[in-house]
Amino acid sequence: MSGNLRDYNAPVALSSSSLPRSLERRLGPLDAAAIVIANVIGVGIFITPGYIAQSVPHPLWILGVWIAGGLLALAGAMAYAELAALRPRSGGEYVYLREAYGPLAAFLTGWTSFVAGFAGAIAAGALGVAQYLGRFIPAAGDPTPLVSLGLFGRHVLRLPLGWAFPLGPLSLVISRQTLVALTAIGALAFVHIRGLGPGRIVQNTLAALKVTALTVFVAVGLGLGHGNTGNFATSAAGAPSFALAMLLVMFSYSGWNAASYVAEEIRNPGRNVPLALGLGTGVVILLYLGLNLLYLYAMPVADITKLAASGQTTVANVAAERLLGPTVSTLLGGLAVVILLSSLSAMTLAGPRVYYAMARDGAFLPSAATVHPRFHTPWISMTAQAIWSGILVLIYSSVALAEYTGFAVLLFSGFAVSALFVLRWRHPNESRPFRAWGYPVAPAVFVVASLAITIFAIVGRPQQSLFGLLIILAGIPLYLWTRHRYAAPDSASREAPKA
């Protein structure tokens, strides 16, 4: 490997006097599965079915793309399971891309995770918490500025081909809504910094509430709701667009790899990481299919597409009202708060492990690898993520960073799964506690499908995707600087994390 960066097979835990502590293996398979479930299931499952119905306006096609997306997610999860069991270290795809394709590719996925992937999603989710709370406590969702500070005037970034991106005006806005969002971010960061003990209690409780509430909603809606099975035989007008539908479905499934980020903190990772990824992904697939069956039972496809066209409400609210009455529809607002808090908690826990791994490799600011002496958490990485997420909450329109780089989530996971082939070729005789199901067909299908869907996303939104690509490539100068400034020549003396 070029430069001062260490061989990735070298030990990874810092042993210097300044950073002597390491993370602890305290998570079991159910803890890790809860992280997967919490990270995947957001309020998107209440919204995206309408747009998917517009793309594939027939009940069987709708259910088919959700099943296909679930199988793809499961194929990816099983590939990650082998990789995580082989390299049970913090960082997820950062680890696998570094080993297979080198430090630059790994750094870019970590950079994107920090600047937009996790932080942007946390900011958007926290604002969502405030908005849904506003249904019960109007002040919580009030976006009226209490303080507004203009940062820049209106500017336009002009690119070749006549593309232009408005960059302003940007303003720092403090409102009751943003204060609630900042409180949610700060509270969850505080809990998870305090250690895996309190962190997993909060995480598991929120995930259990989410799964239980959604399961009850599906069971009661199908069992007692006033629906119509004839809806499963009706379709809406329009030509199917399976590529667009799969794009939406795969974004709805994104997060199935969450347990891999904390592999270094899972007991017996060779057994429990695959179990967590498989169990978590399987539960999500069943819940998503159940919810879509419920939506179709509640209303015909034509009505679902009309909801998406109007953009005024979610499919879940209308389905709940038609099946069980307006009271249950109102209660879904409370469930949405739980769903969002659960997702925020999972991202608060998972994201910093990427920056921690980068810093430990000498590819990021060294302080990001600092482990709290009492709580054994990467507390500086967690604090940095919370601060940046808070800044994104306060800066008007900045949450769009997550939208611009959304295609990269699928792109990087596709490359990470392809690392499975590279590592099997490079290290054919290395002991593997778990081997991916369906190899080589299942992971190959995932890689091809991920690249195809990514290309479709880029073609469909070229300007936004190009701007997202610029955000990703902006990490290269930082990579070169950190590589020159912080790469440690004595990495061979470091201790490896114990499995």
Image (cartoon, rainbow, N blue to C red):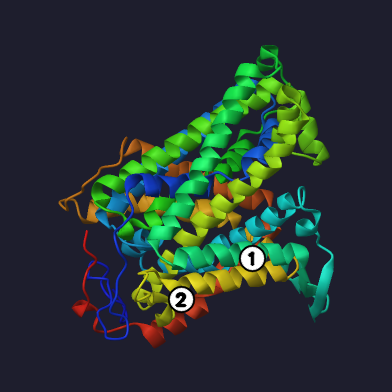
Q: Is residue 181 left or right of residue 396?
A: left
The C terminus lies in which quarter of the figure? bottom left
Q: Nearer the viewer, mark 2 or mark 1?
A: 1
Q: CA distance from mark 2 to mark 1?
A: 18 Å
Amino acid type at image mark 1: Thr
Residue at left offset 69%, top offset 61%: 400
Where does label 1 land, which residue? 183
- Asked if one can make out residue 243 in the rendered structure from this viewpoint, the answer is yes
- Label 2: state its secondary structure: helix
In front here: 410 or 200? 200
Residue at left offset 29%, top offset 75%: 21
The N terminus lies in which quarter of the figure? bottom left
Position of residue 326 relative to residue 176, above or below, is above
Whether pointer 2 and pointer 1 mark residues with C-beta atoms closer than 8 Å, the reply is no
- Label 1: state its secondary structure: helix
State the image coordinates of residue 441 (x, y, percent, origin top left).
Answer: 35, 36
Numbered badge on residue 380: 2
Q: Is residue 468 left or right of residue 37?
A: right
- Asked if one can make out residue 315 in the rendered structure from this viewpoint, the answer is no
Numbered badge on residue 385: none
In front here: 366 or 474? 366
In front here: 144 or 356? 144
State the image coordinates of residue 275 (x, y, percent, origin top left).
Answer: 32, 41
State the image coordinates of residue 105 (x, y, percent, origin top left).
Answer: 43, 66
